[in-house]
Image: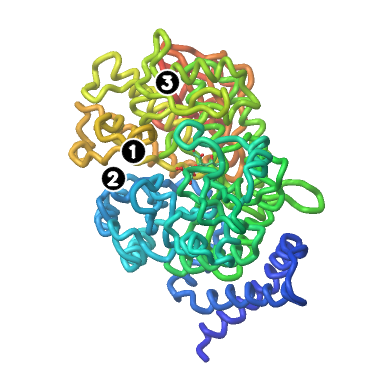
Amino acid sequence: MTSSVFSRAAALHDRLDRHWPVADALLRRLYGGTPGPDHWLDHWLGQVREAVTRAARNRPQALADLDTWRQAKPDWFQRPDQLGYCFYVDRFAGTLAGVRRRLDYLADLGVTYLHPLPLLAMQSGDNDGGFAVADYRSVEPRLGTAEDLRALAEDAHQAGMALCLDVVCNHTARDHAWAQAALAGDPTYRAYYHVLDSADEVAAYEATLGQVFPKTAPGNFTPEPSLARDGGGAWVWTTFYPYQWDLNYANPAVFLEMLEVLLHLANQGVDVFRLDSTPFLWKTPGTSCRGLPQTHWIVQAWRALLAIAAPGVLLKGEAIVDPDDVVSFFGRDEATGLPAANECHLAYNNGMMTALWLAQATGDANPAHALLDRLSGRPRQAAWITYVRCHDDIIWDALAALIPQETLHRVSAFYAGATAGSYALGAAFQADGGGAPSTNGMAASLVGLRPEGRPGEADTDAALARLLQLYQVTLALDGLPVLYMGDEIALTNAPLSGLPNGEGRWLHRPHMDWDQAAGRDDGATAAGAFHTALHQLIRVRASLPALHGAEPAQPLAGLPAGVLGFRRVGFRPLLCLANLTGETVTVALPTGSAGRDVVVEKDVDPAAVPLAAWQARWIEVR
Ligand code: OTU
């Protein structure tokens, strides 16, 4: 036995001692009441334990080394030199092999975290951009092979980048072998899904459920007559599109299947799992079926089990819910009810993203300030994913607990370009039960950049200033910032021809413009001017200790209404100030002490710091 084999075995033993009791307790709580033969639960828990120990032993040495390195610096994903990049593989580079050839471009930008959107084998035809997975163990043939995925992970690791992959754990495609077996009459696989037998049952559930796609996919159930038993009816639970069948996590077999998927992908080199639609995993009649306690226990159990098999791997929650509820996805201490870092290491700060867009449209920083206060309960070891745009629509209703409906409707209309004086070039997308329609569009279009715009023109300069401000504020928030593909060159909306009917989200899923990217240093173009400015911010950020993600951003009091401001504490504190208006505003630093703009590298007069129209500044204070 070599010493490395010995120490790996000893370390695994330690991790089992630490994390197995946690997983065991959670799983007994989840499945203790499930009927079955004598001792089935002990037998099943034995299978779970066997699956994680097997995966731990089979973990490739290079990945085990990465685990060791990450355990030695567990805050790696909170460090200010981290930057994510999110993209559709086909739109960015054609294939996985194409992505590997673009890693230099990304490294140049400062990217350390790659998030290709779904790339596993998907439903044929419509597949919600890959969020309908037909096989979790193979790659979509159009994009490459399982070997290409491993090679991408290896190249990324060589370049100092982590790889994040979507695990669409709430639902499978109708094309998935489990769903197909269910349709063919196999009762074992029918029990992998939620199948209701009567229209009354459907109506009873619908009474308390929301809707995600009320226009393109109304309702939460889809009739599937071939699933019917005893001459009755059959409706399968489909929260999203009719071809996305929600998995039934009350069935322990489903939990174990998805655990095996996670273990498999972790050993292919995936570092971060984006748990798609995290809130929806558990269903209880009479509830909204979002963020139920059992959902949290499932994710906590996955975390404990991955900590045994692949201790460097992270979980990222995707919960677009009320800001108070989002924080709960980082975890909670069972005994005290206080936040604890025992669930997702990362979660999307959807609230701040939405509040920043709202702030620019209304010129009012107060909602963003209030939100910063609410979000500060995050456990310090966990981090937000901060972002300006992503592949989904901006859901105004996610702020319904904080912002009056009338304002949400006004902002929604503003970004659709439907209010007087609006510069925005976005489009409205479906609304949930009378709420404000959400918004589609690339960030550059939402700030009003026209594709033909050139620096030096007033409208173009204002649009670019707004876009830079959104990024400057986001890069200064606490969290791991993830850039959405094309934003670095101020890429505008996809051409309207070519958009699939009704699915307006493709407006902001254009193809990468590699000609514009090639000209990224040419300040005479909007792409070049923006890239140069953003690139500088990314470099400066990496050098600022106050931008480490552990401590939350603290809103600043006493600023004019049109100025957003927060403090980042730490060694050499930093203030981020952003002027949400088209006029110059002068503010006094609330600290009164000397300050220095770390981007332009100039001292400022603490009594009078000018902020140009739409400008943001980073000011280090003593
Ligand atoms: C996610 O988003 C994905 O990001 C979407 O692209 C998918 O269509 C969807 O899941 C289905 O797989 O409603 O509008 O609280 O809100 O999971 C985006 C989380 C969504 C949900 C979220 C969902």
Q: Name the residue under label 1.
A: 509
Instruction: Measure how far apart labels 3 and 1 are at the Cα level.
Output: 17 Å
Q: Name the residue under label 3.
A: 415
Along the polypeptide, which appears first: circle 3 or circle 2?
2
**Furthest-bottom residue in view?**
1
Sort mark 1 into few (<14), some (14-19) or many (20+) by Cα contacts within 10 Å: many
Q: Name the residue under label 2.
A: 91
In the image, 518 versus 185, the foreground residue is: 185
Inspect the image, locate mark 1, and give the three-letter code of the amino acid beneath it. Answer: Arg
Instruction: Measure how far apart labels 1 and 2 are at the Cα level.
Output: 8 Å
Asked if residue 337 is positioned above or below residue 582 in the image, the reply reads below
Along the polypeptide, which appears first: circle 1 or circle 2?
2
Q: Is residue 430 left or right of residue 305?
A: left
Asked if residue 196 is positioned above or below residue 348 in the image, the reply reads below
Q: Is mark 2 on a helix, strand or loop?
A: helix
Q: Quadrant of the C terminus?
A: top right
- Image point (27%, 22%), residue name: 450
Q: What element carries label 3?
A: helix
